[in-house]
Image (spheres, rainbow, N blue to C red):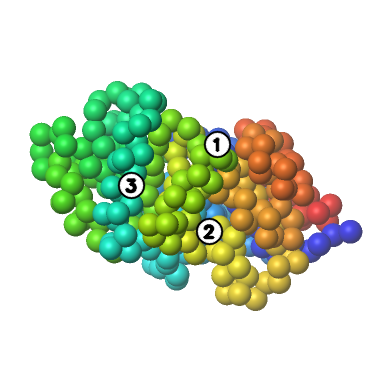
Amino acid sequence: MSRNIKLIVTDLDGTFVPDMWNLVPENLKALKAAKEAGIRVCACTGRHWGMARTVLEAGEFDPICIASNGAAILHAHTGEYYEKKLIKKEWLLDIVAYLKQKAANEPNIGARTLTVRGYGGTPGMDYIRFCDKNVFLNWNEHIVEDVLEHDVYLLDETYPMTTRLYRREADWIAAAGDTIERILFDIGRSEVEDVLELRKELSAIAPVEVTSAYGTVIEITHNEATKGNALKWLCNHYGIPQSQTLAMGDGLNDMPMVQWAAVGVAVGNARPALKEVADIVAPNVADGGFAKVVYDCIEGRI
C-alpha cells in the first residue's frame, strides 16, 4: 500500500553523490521527477553549507536544506538561517583541551593529521577542526603565516571548499566565537563504540551530540543538533505529517532521521549499524539507489 510520501530527506555524500567530486546523473533526473510529482526532496548533510553548495546548486532540491548534521537549517541558495543550534564559545576551550589530551594517546593520529592540502603526515593540530556556516577553521602552529587560507574546488570552480588555518591557538578560538556548527575530530577510527565512548566523555564537559558521517572523522555538535530533530522541524514548517516522510542515508549521523521517518532507507553502501535500523536497503549510491527509491515513491511502491 502506498504511503503517499510527500517529503524525502536525503543525505548527500555516500547517498546522493558517491564523493565530493562526482554526481550521479540518474539521481539528478529523479530529483526533477520528484518535484514534478509534488514530492519535496530536502538535502540533509553533514557538510556545512559552504561545502554543500556545489551539490545543492546542481540539482532541483527543496529551497530549505539541513547542514552540519542538523545544527543548521538554511535557505539552500542564500545560506540564510531558519534555525541553528551552535556550539557555545564558552564550551570550546574545555572541549579542545579534552580532545588534545585524548589525541596524545592515540597511535594513529600522525597518519591522519590534516594539512592545508588534505590528509598527510605533517605535525600539527589539524585533526581538530571547527566548521562555521562557510569554512573550516583549523589550528596548526607549524604554518609560517599567522593566518593561511586555502581553497579546494570540488565539482567546478564556482564554490570553493575553504580552509582557514591559524598559527596561534588563541586566535583560532577567538575567530570561532559563537559561529561554530560542528567540531571534527579524527583519531583514525570511528566505530560505533568510539562514538558512544566520546559522547559519554564529552557530555560531562558540555551538552553536545557526537556522531560520525564519513571515514574516521567523529563529529561534535550541540546536543539538540541531529538530523532527526531537523526532520521534525521540516515537518512542522511544511505541515507534513510524519506518516508521509522518508529519510535516506549511509552513515551513523543519518540514524536519527532514518529511525524517525515513516520510512527509513539505507543505501547498499551504508554502515552496517544503519542498515540494521532501516526499513529498506536500497542499491548502492553509485548504482542510483536514491533514484530507485524516488521512483518507487512516485509510482506508489513505497
Q: CA distance from mark 1 to mark 2?
A: 18 Å
Specify the quadrant of the image occupied by residue 119: top left
Q: Earlier in the sequence, mark 3 or mark 2?
A: 3
Instruction: Answer with left or right where residue 297 lies relative to residue 228.
Output: right
Q: Residue 125's mark? A: none
What x and y, as percent, mark residue 26?
Answer: 64, 40
- The type of residue carrying mark 2 is Thr
Q: CA distance from mark 3 to mark 2?
A: 22 Å
Question: For mark 1, what is the residue?
Answer: 191
Q: Residue 98's mark? A: 3
Secondary structure of the residue carrying tag 2 is: loop
Secondary structure of the residue carrying tag 1 is: loop
In-front residue for pair 115/93: 93
Secondary structure of the residue carrying tag 3 is: helix
What x and y, as percent, mark residue 166?
Answer: 18, 44
Residue at (31%, 40%) from the top-left corner?
A: 101
Question: For mark 2, what is the residue?
Answer: 226
Which numbered mark, 1 or 2, is in the foreground of this view?
Answer: 1
